[in-house]
Image: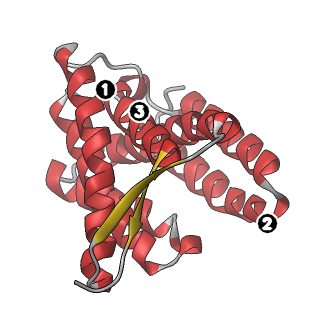
Amino acid sequence: MTTPTLSLSLLVLVGAACPVQAFRYAGPARLAAAVTGVAGLAWYVAPSTGVLARPHGWWWCLAAVAVGAGAIGVEVGVVAALRRRRVARVALHGSASRAVAAAVVTGLAEEVLFRGVAQHLLGVLGLPAVAAIGAVAVAYGLNHLYFGWDTVAQKVATGLLFGGLYALSGGSVLVPVIAHVTQNVLVLTVLPRLGGRP
């Protein structure tokens, strides 16, 4: 949807995305449905150039997989640094099929909301790219406050990575979606554990 008022899309985004966090208390199935609904709404109200743009080159999709895998190291490193601990081992999950499906939907929803709508609109409104990436990364991090301040710090760091991918790939939300989904799937199948103090 293209509207003459750019802030209308942002208003719909904020008005829908913030209340959906209440579904965290209703269980994973309802949260997944709520996040999917908000992603659909965001896709509908998003400026078409912010969501449907193609990357400058398809190699960006491969770069996104590498960044998504590397984002795990960034997030683990942030928590390890905050807690002054080291990564002791990596453990594999046994059954994660439902969680992987939720990870795909969540990654898609968050990237449409934060990069495809918010970052795009901030750029259209005249905010320099670096400032837009930073502002959206902070908003993305605060969206995870429910999980604690360590998680907020992790998500700000990966929000900067995903925002950078979005900007450098030519404003294609597909690239950060691939990175985010790769990260989520790997986090759910390979779980780094923090050990004791070095």
The Cα–Cα distance between marks 1 and 2, rounded to whole angstroms, is 33 Å
32, 34: nearer the viewer: 32
Q: Amino acid at mark 3?
A: Val
The correct choice, above or below, for 94 with respect to 160 in the image is above
Name the residue carrying label 2: 25
Label for residue 177? 3
- Residue at x 42% of width, y 27% of height: 51
Name the residue carrying label 1: 172
- Residue at x 81% of width, y 57% of height: 27
The Cα–Cα distance between marks 1 and 3, rounded to whole angstroms, is 9 Å
**Callout 1: few (<14), some (14-19), or many (20+) C-alpha neighbours within 10 Å?**
many
Q: Amino acid at mark 2?
A: Tyr
Q: In the image, residue 185 lies at what x, y percent?
A: 48, 38
| Nearest-to-viewer mark from 1 and 3 | 3
Question: Which of the marked residues, 1 or 3, is nearer the chain's N terminus?
Answer: 1
Q: In the image, residue 48 lies at what x, y percent?
A: 43, 23
| Nearest-to-viewer mark from 1 and 2 | 2
Q: Is residue 183 left or right of residue 65?
A: right
Q: Which element type, helix, strand or loop, lies under badge 1?
A: loop
